[in-house]
Amino acid sequence: MNTGKQQKPVLTGQRFKTRKRDEKEKFEPTVFRDTIVLGLNDSGGDLEAVSKFLDVTGSRVDYRRYADTLFDILIAGSMLAPGGSHIDEGDQTKVTTVCVFGAEESHAAQRLYAQVFNKLIRRYKYLEKAFEEEVKKVSSSSSSSSGRKHVFQKM
Protein backbone atom coordinates (compact mmCIF):
# COMPACT_ATOMS: atom_id res chain seq x y z
CA MET A 1 0.00 0.00 0.00
CA ASN A 2 1.10 3.44 -0.81
CA THR A 3 0.99 5.61 2.28
CA GLY A 4 1.65 8.82 0.34
CA LYS A 5 -1.02 11.45 -0.03
CA GLN A 6 -2.87 11.36 -3.31
CA GLN A 7 -3.29 14.61 -5.19
CA LYS A 8 -6.76 15.74 -6.02
CA PRO A 9 -7.68 16.18 -9.66
CA VAL A 10 -7.49 19.74 -11.00
CA LEU A 11 -10.05 21.16 -13.36
CA THR A 12 -8.52 22.92 -16.30
CA GLY A 13 -10.00 25.56 -18.52
CA GLN A 14 -11.63 27.61 -15.78
CA ARG A 15 -10.88 31.24 -15.27
CA PHE A 16 -11.03 33.11 -12.04
CA LYS A 17 -13.54 35.93 -12.21
CA THR A 18 -12.70 39.08 -10.34
CA ARG A 19 -15.47 40.76 -8.47
CA LYS A 20 -16.66 44.14 -9.62
CA ARG A 21 -15.72 45.70 -6.30
CA ASP A 22 -12.13 44.52 -6.82
CA GLU A 23 -11.80 45.97 -10.31
CA LYS A 24 -10.11 49.34 -10.35
CA GLU A 25 -10.99 51.93 -12.96
CA LYS A 26 -8.22 54.01 -14.42
CA PHE A 27 -8.14 57.67 -13.43
CA GLU A 28 -8.23 59.45 -16.79
CA PRO A 29 -9.15 63.11 -16.35
CA THR A 30 -8.06 63.93 -19.91
CA VAL A 31 -10.65 61.56 -21.41
CA PHE A 32 -13.27 63.08 -19.10
CA ARG A 33 -12.15 66.58 -20.11
CA ASP A 34 -12.44 65.75 -23.81
CA THR A 35 -16.00 64.45 -23.31
CA ILE A 36 -17.15 67.51 -21.36
CA VAL A 37 -15.42 70.09 -23.58
CA LEU A 38 -16.84 68.50 -26.73
CA GLY A 39 -20.37 68.60 -25.30
CA LEU A 40 -20.01 72.19 -24.11
CA ASN A 41 -18.66 73.33 -27.47
CA ASP A 42 -21.50 71.51 -29.28
CA SER A 43 -24.07 73.37 -27.18
CA GLY A 44 -23.18 76.58 -28.99
CA GLY A 45 -23.30 78.72 -25.86
CA ASP A 46 -26.94 77.88 -25.03
CA LEU A 47 -26.84 77.41 -21.26
CA GLU A 48 -30.11 75.47 -21.22
CA ALA A 49 -28.50 72.95 -23.60
CA VAL A 50 -25.39 72.93 -21.39
CA SER A 51 -27.50 72.13 -18.34
CA LYS A 52 -29.29 69.32 -20.16
CA PHE A 53 -25.98 67.95 -21.47
CA LEU A 54 -24.45 67.91 -17.98
CA ASP A 55 -27.53 66.18 -16.57
CA VAL A 56 -27.50 63.45 -19.24
CA THR A 57 -23.73 63.00 -19.16
CA GLY A 58 -23.74 62.51 -15.39
CA SER A 59 -25.25 59.06 -15.83
CA ARG A 60 -22.47 57.98 -18.21
CA VAL A 61 -19.37 59.47 -16.60
CA ASP A 62 -18.29 59.57 -12.96
CA TYR A 63 -18.79 63.12 -11.68
CA ARG A 64 -17.82 62.01 -8.18
CA ARG A 65 -14.35 60.95 -9.32
CA TYR A 66 -13.74 63.86 -11.71
CA ALA A 67 -15.50 66.67 -9.79
CA ASP A 68 -12.44 68.92 -9.66
CA THR A 69 -11.87 68.55 -13.41
CA LEU A 70 -15.56 69.23 -14.10
CA PHE A 71 -15.56 72.47 -12.14
CA ASP A 72 -12.19 73.52 -13.61
CA ILE A 73 -13.80 73.28 -17.04
CA LEU A 74 -17.08 74.97 -16.07
CA ILE A 75 -15.35 77.85 -14.29
CA ALA A 76 -12.09 78.38 -16.20
CA GLY A 77 -12.71 76.66 -19.54
CA SER A 78 -10.08 73.91 -19.24
CA MET A 79 -8.15 71.92 -16.68
CA LEU A 80 -6.06 74.01 -14.31
CA ALA A 81 -2.51 73.29 -13.18
CA PRO A 82 -1.74 73.58 -9.46
CA GLY A 83 -0.50 77.15 -9.96
CA GLY A 84 -3.80 78.20 -11.52
CA SER A 85 -2.65 78.30 -15.13
CA HIS A 86 -4.42 76.45 -17.94
CA ILE A 87 -2.91 73.07 -18.78
CA ASP A 88 -4.25 73.01 -22.35
CA GLU A 89 -3.75 76.62 -23.37
CA GLY A 90 -2.26 75.85 -26.78
CA ASP A 91 -4.76 73.25 -27.99
CA GLN A 92 -8.13 74.88 -28.71
CA THR A 93 -9.93 71.52 -28.97
CA LYS A 94 -9.36 71.00 -25.25
CA VAL A 95 -10.61 74.44 -24.20
CA THR A 96 -14.14 75.80 -24.15
CA THR A 97 -15.46 79.34 -24.06
CA VAL A 98 -18.68 78.17 -22.40
CA CYS A 99 -17.40 78.89 -18.91
CA VAL A 100 -17.72 81.50 -16.18
CA PHE A 101 -14.47 83.23 -17.15
CA GLY A 102 -15.58 83.36 -20.79
CA ALA A 103 -18.98 84.84 -19.97
CA GLU A 104 -20.03 88.44 -20.33
CA GLU A 105 -19.53 90.57 -17.26
CA SER A 106 -23.21 91.45 -17.06
CA HIS A 107 -25.23 90.41 -14.05
CA ALA A 108 -27.79 88.58 -16.22
CA ALA A 109 -25.16 86.41 -17.91
CA GLN A 110 -23.62 85.45 -14.59
CA ARG A 111 -27.04 84.62 -13.18
CA LEU A 112 -27.54 82.11 -16.02
CA TYR A 113 -24.25 80.39 -15.15
CA ALA A 114 -25.28 80.32 -11.48
CA GLN A 115 -28.49 78.55 -12.52
CA VAL A 116 -26.46 75.92 -14.39
CA PHE A 117 -24.39 75.28 -11.25
CA ASN A 118 -27.51 75.18 -9.07
CA LYS A 119 -29.22 72.64 -11.34
CA LEU A 120 -26.10 70.49 -11.46
CA ILE A 121 -25.58 70.54 -7.69
CA ARG A 122 -29.27 69.86 -6.97
CA ARG A 123 -29.19 66.87 -9.32
CA TYR A 124 -25.86 65.55 -8.01
CA LYS A 125 -25.79 66.53 -4.33
CA TYR A 126 -22.32 65.05 -3.77
CA LEU A 127 -20.85 67.79 -6.00
CA GLU A 128 -21.64 70.52 -3.48
CA LYS A 129 -18.51 70.07 -1.37
CA ALA A 130 -16.29 69.72 -4.44
CA PHE A 131 -17.80 72.94 -5.84
CA GLU A 132 -16.99 74.86 -2.65
CA GLU A 133 -13.41 73.59 -2.70
CA GLU A 134 -13.03 74.46 -6.38
CA VAL A 135 -14.29 78.02 -5.87
CA LYS A 136 -11.78 78.48 -3.05
CA LYS A 137 -8.97 77.14 -5.25
CA VAL A 138 -9.88 79.20 -8.30
CA SER A 139 -10.48 82.40 -6.36
CA SER A 140 -7.11 82.16 -4.60
CA SER A 141 -5.07 81.22 -7.66
CA SER A 142 -6.82 82.85 -10.60
CA SER A 143 -4.25 84.47 -12.83
CA SER A 144 -6.51 87.14 -14.30
CA SER A 145 -8.21 89.86 -12.31
CA SER A 146 -11.31 89.61 -14.51
CA GLY A 147 -11.51 85.91 -13.63
CA ARG A 148 -11.43 86.72 -9.94
CA LYS A 149 -14.02 89.40 -10.49
CA HIS A 150 -16.35 86.82 -12.09
CA VAL A 151 -15.92 84.39 -9.20
CA PHE A 152 -16.46 86.96 -6.48
CA GLN A 153 -19.51 88.47 -8.18
CA LYS A 154 -21.10 85.02 -8.26
CA MET A 155 -20.76 84.68 -4.52
Image: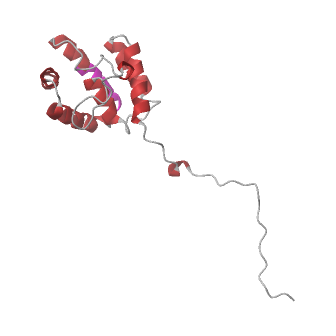
Quadrant location of residue 135? Answer: top left
Which residue shows up at 20% across the image and 12% down it? 104
Near-viewer residue (12 or 19):
12
Residue 86 percent location from the top left of the image: 27, 28
Residue 90 percent location from the top left of the image: 32, 22
**Which residue lies most toward the right here?**
1
Q: Quadrant for the C terminus, please.
A: top left
Residue 118 percent location from the top left of the image: 27, 25
Near-viewer residue (127 or 151):
151
Can residue 121 be seen in the rendering of this structure? no
Which residue shows up at 54% across the image and 48% down it? 20
Q: Is residue 53 left or right of residue 84?
A: right
Q: Is residue 64 magenta?
A: no
Q: Is residue 116 magenta?
A: yes
Q: Quadrant for the N terminus, please.
A: bottom right
Region in magenta: 114-124
